[in-house]
Amino acid sequence: MNQATSSLTRRSFLKRSGALASVALAAPTIVPSHVLGADPPSETVTMGMIGTGRQCYLRNIPLFQRQPDCRIVAVCDPDSWRMGQAKKRVDDYNRTKHGMTDGCAAFADYQDLLARDDIDAVMISTPDHWHGKMGVDAMQAGKDVALEKPVIRTIREGQQLRDASKKHARIFRVDSEFRVGAPARRAYSIVQSGALGKIHKVYACVPESDVPLAPQPDMPVPEELDYKRWQGADDTQAPPIPYTLHGVHPRHGLGRPGWMRKLNYCDGMITNWGTHLLNGSLWCMGLDRQWPVEISGTGVYPAAESFWNVLLKFAVTYKYANGVELIYRTEKPYMRFEGDKGWIDAGFGHFKASDDALLKAKHPLVDSPEPRQTSEKRDFLDSVKSRKPTWEPAEVGHVVTSTCLLGHLAVDAAVPLKFDGTKEQFVDNDRANAMLDRPIVTPNADLQAKP
C-alpha cells in the first residue's frame, strides 16, 4: 500500500461518519481484498514496522508475517538501504502468500507512518534511546504497540509508557520471547505451585559478552543514512557525537550493531538480556509488578579511552519486602530458584531440577498452553483483537526494565540504594533521584578498568 491508496478502511469510515469513534480506534482495521490479498481474514491486524535493522529483518518481520491474521503495510527507517531490504522482504511475502498487488509504504520519519489511519499497530525495533518516545507517540496516535526490549532507558520513560497505555486504552506488549519458552513456563509453573517450598535464593544470570573498543575516528556519514534523524538529538536524550561506523550499525549488513555497546544509546547487557532472564525470574516469583526495597551492586566499565563503554561485567543484589533476595550478574544465561524442597535451573533451551519429579510433573502452561502463551507475536495480535492485556503489558515492561536500571544505577553509584516503590523514587539519595529521568551516558570513573 502506498500513500496514494484511496480505499476506504473500516476505521476511516467510522471516523468520517462520526459514529463510534472509540471503536474505530480499538478494533482492527478491515481493508479491501486488493490491499490485503484474496480472502483476507475478517479481523486482520495491519501493522507498521518502525526500525528495520537486524532484529526487525531477521526476527520480527518474519514472525509477524507467519501469523495468518497479520499484514505488514508500512516500514520506516532513517537508513534507506535497511528500509529497502525490509520493504522487499515484506512485499515479496505479501505478493506470494496473500496476492497483494500494492507494495508496502516506506518512510524515513516515523511520525509519517503514525499519521496513517489504516495502521492498527506498530512494532518498534529501533535502538533503545528511541523506545520510550516512539512508544508514547504511537499510543497517542491511536496505535497498539509491540516494543522491542529493553523498552526504556530511564525510569521516567517507563512511567510515561505505562500512563500512555492506560490513558489512550492502547494494547502494549514488551517484545521479549523468554517467557513464552517452554523452560520459562515450566519454571513459572513449579515456583508458583509451591513445589520448591520457601524460596530463599534466586539467581538471574546473563552472558558476559560486551567488550571494549579502541577510540574511533570521525567518518563521513554514509549517503543512505540520515544520521541526525537516527541519533535523535532533538528528540531523545542521546548526546550527539560525530558519526563513526561502530557507533551505529554495519553498512549494508545486519551484523551486531555498535550502538548496543555505547552508553549514548543503551545500557548494555544489564538491560539487554536482563529483560529476558531477570524478567523471567521476577515473573516466576510474582515480583514483576513490585519493586525491590534495596539494591546494591558492583561492576566494571571499560577503560576511559574505550569507545564502547557499557558495563563489561556486574553483580547486583535486590532485596524485596517479602524477604526474597535476587542476585543478578554476568555469567551465562540461566535463572535458578533455590528453595527448602529443591532447586530448578532454566534458560532459553534447558531445564534442570534437583528431583526427577519436578522434570516430569504435568503443568497446563507447559503441556497444553494457549497459542498466545507460546509466541510473543501471537500474544500481541490476540490482545489487539480481544482488547485484553498482553502477558507483558506496559506496567510490567516499566517495572522489569526499571529494575534493571535500578541495578545499573546502584553499580554506577557504587553505594547501596534504598527504593520507595510507592513513590517510585530513591530514599535519601538526591544524586540517584536526579537520574530517574536521565540515562547513564558517562561511566563512573571509579569503576573503569585500569590499563
Image (spheres, helix red, strand yellow):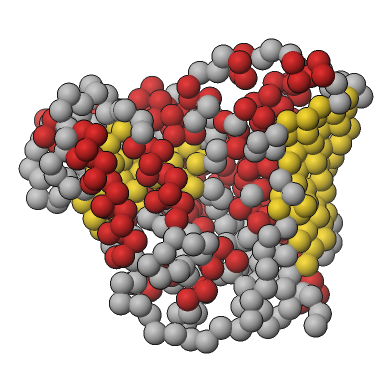
Say left or right for 45 vs 243.
left
Q: Position of residue 219 (x, y in %)?
A: 44, 85
Q: Is residue 410 above or below residue 398?
A: below
Specify the farthest residue to the front. 96
Q: Is residue 72 above or below residue 43?
A: below
**Residue 400 in picture, x, y percent from top left:** 64, 43
Which quadrant: the C terminus?
bottom right
Residue at horizontal 13 percent and vertical 41 percent from the top = 101
The picture places residue 252, in percent across and down from the top left corner, at 37, 67
Q: Is residue 120 left or right of residue 269?
A: left
Work out whether residue 153 or residue 221 is closer to the camera in this orientation and state it.
221
Q: Position of residue 350 (x, y in %)?
A: 70, 34
- Residue 138 drawn above or below residue 209: above
Residue for point 41% across, 38% down: 63
Q: Is residue 423 above or below residue 33?
A: below
* Quarter of the N terminus within the rendering: top left
